Image: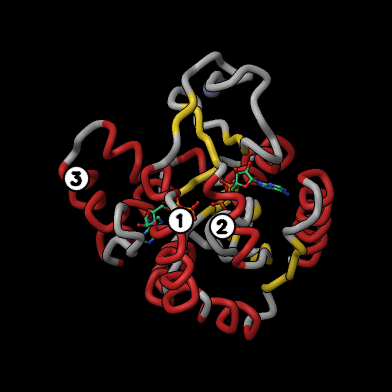
Amino acid sequence: MSGTVVVLLGPPGSGKGTQAKRLVEVLGTPHVSSGDLFRHHLSQETELGLMAHSYMEDGELVPDDVTVEMVVERISRPDCEDGVLLDGFPRTLNQAEALKKALANRGHQVTVVPLIQVSDDEVLRRLTARRVCEACGAVYNLVFNPPQEEGVCDVCGGDLYQREDDDPETVNHRLYTYYKETSPLIGYYFAQDLLVEIDGEQSFKAVSEDLLRAIGEAAKES
Ligand code: ADP
Ligand code: ADP
Ligand code: ZN
């Protein structure tokens, strides 16, 4: 196979999006985030976006069939021919099986699944202080990674906003959803010898170094 298919696994707030943005600069593959795709649909008020919204605001998963269709369409585009970094997908065993089939159709397979481990308390601390740029999607944290000027993106000058699902009650429900629906993927990928555990409570830099090492080693072996 050509290229590297990385599946970033970890609870909400473990740093998947933040790390993905750095990793793709090194890997040169597209970053495909199912959450970003849904939020883009919502901002365009497409039928899919409006349907997904009712699940997202409650911290529930969007049904597998529409999620799989959306992501498989995205990774079937030519820019993903040489690999892709997946963030937030798959999130259920059904989605993982659908991904496997879609990749196999094109002679690809998952190369490595880094599992970014972060405690529930840290997830709550991080997500209630998360801010996101409306224009470019850059991710900030009021405590750990604040923008230079309050409410303004360092990268593009866009306005920063708080996601409506980052309130404590919805974060708790998203964690519940993660343990119930997504954590079975840990065993699924472990059994395929693809899982690599990463300590997500280190500094931004230490986490990205561990991720790059894990991806580099897996790519060499595959
Ligand atoms: P986070 O990065 O905080 O984990 P995401 O941006 O990945 O959150 O996801 C936000 C919401 O979008 C989820 O709570 C869920 O409703 C929906 N979503 C994203 N990815 C998926 C997926 N693979 N399957 C089902 N729903 C998803
Ligand atoms: P996810 O995509 O997994 O939901 P994000 O990348 O959006 O997670 O990160 C969630 C929040 O935690 C953001 O506010 C981000 O700035 C912050 N964050 C990410 N990595 C770290 C880290 N290593 N240390 C402290 N805060 C972090
Ligand atoms: Zn920006």
The earlier-in-sequence mark between 2 and 1 is 2
Judge depth for marks 3 and 1 and give the one in front: 1
Amino acid type at mark 2: Leu
Residue 112 can be seen in this image: no
Amino acid carrying mark 3 in the image: Leu
The image quadrant that residue 219 belongs to is: bottom right
Q: In this rendered view, identify the residue nearer to me: 28 or 156.
A: 156
What's the CA distance linking mark 2 and mark 1? 7 Å
The residue mark sitting in front, 3 or 2, is 2
Answer whether labels 3 and 1 touch (C-beta < 8 Å): no
Mark 1 = which residue? 168
Please tell me whether mark 3 sits on a helix, a strand or a loop.
helix
Mark 1 crowdedness (10 Å alpha carbons): few <14, some 14-19, many ≥20: some
Q: Is residue 179 left or right of residue 25?
A: left
165 relative to 150, above or below: below
Q: Residue at x 42, y 50 (%)?
A: 167
Q: Are the residues tagged 2 and 1 within 8 Å (C-beta)?
A: yes
Residue 123, percent across and down? 59, 58
- N-terminal of the two: label 3 or label 2? 3
Regarding mark 1 in the picture, which secondary structure is present there?
helix
Q: Residue 88: x, y in percent?
A: 49, 57
Residue 154, x across and y down, in percent? 63, 19
Q: Is mark 1 within 8 Å of ligand 1?
A: no
Label placed on residue 50:
3
- Residue receiving disc 2: 124
